[in-house]
Each structure stands twice: as C-alpha cells, then as structure tokens.
Image (tube, rainbow, N blue to C red):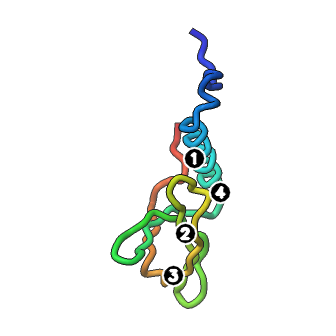
Amino acid sequence: MHESRSPPSNFGGLPQYQLVKSMAEGLVQVENATGVKPALVSIEDGWQIGYLLATLENNWVAVFLPQALTPMSGNVMYLPAEQVRPLDIPMMTQQ
C-alpha cells in the first residue's frame, strides 16, 4: 500500500479539516521559533501555558500567551519573573 502525505481530495473542502490544518501549521511555526521556551504563566487565579520570549531588567519577563484555536494569535505580556515558571521540555518532539 502506498502512503501519501496529501489528504484525500474530498477533505480539502471540509471546514473542520481546514481548521485543524491551520492549527497544526501554526503550531509548527511556534515550535520552530528560536529562543522561545515553553512556560507556565500565572494569570489571575490559574496557570496558562505560554512561551517565555525574553528576560528583562528588574526581574521582569516578556511572555507570549497563545489564544485558543489559533496558537499564532495571542497576547504578549510583561510580567514579574516570579509569575513565570519555565518548563524543561523540548519545543519539538523527537521522532
């Protein structure tokens, strides 16, 4: 059996397929970014997964908090470093 990396032609027109495809492409772009580390970010009374972008002066950091459905959209926030816990996990999985 021959495996193809292209989806069957009837998938391309399905809105659900286009949404999932767009999300996957956005995640690949985030995972390929250099100098960005995954982190847990304390927001209000909970924690959100985000990306540590830079360490700034006076114990502050810049983080990117992706929004649901489209990880390439979100907010850049400047927070005290104690509100951010860098995660010791790779951005990309090894295959």
Give the residue displayed 61% in from the left and 23% down from the top: 10
| CA–CA distance in space, label 4 to label 1 | 16 Å
Question: How far across and how far down the image is residue 40, in percent?
Answer: 43, 67
Mark 4 vs mark 3: in front: 3
| CA–CA distance in space, label 2 to label 4 | 11 Å
Q: Which is more toward the observer, 77 or 92? A: 77
| CA–CA distance in space, label 3 to label 2 | 10 Å
Q: Which residue is mark 3?
A: 79
Which callout, 1 or 2, points at the residue further toward the start of the chain?
1
Question: How far across and how far down the image is residue 2, in percent?
Answer: 60, 12
Which callout, 4 or 3, points at the residue further toward the start of the chain?
4
Give the residue displayed 41% in from the left and 74% down from the top: 42
State which quadrant residue 56 falls in: bottom right
Which callout, 4 or 1, points at the residue further toward the start of the chain?
1
Q: Which residue is mark 4?
A: 33
Most extreme residue toward the bottom is 58
Q: Which residue is mark 1?
A: 23
Label 4 packing within 10 angstroms: few (<14), some (14-19), many (20+) = few
Q: Are marks 3 and 2 in contact (CB under 8 Å)?
A: no
Q: Which residue is mark 2?
A: 52
Question: How far across and how far down the image is residue 55, in percent?
Answer: 58, 78
Question: What amino acid is at disc 4?
Answer: Ala
Q: Which is more toward the observer, 60 or 44? A: 44
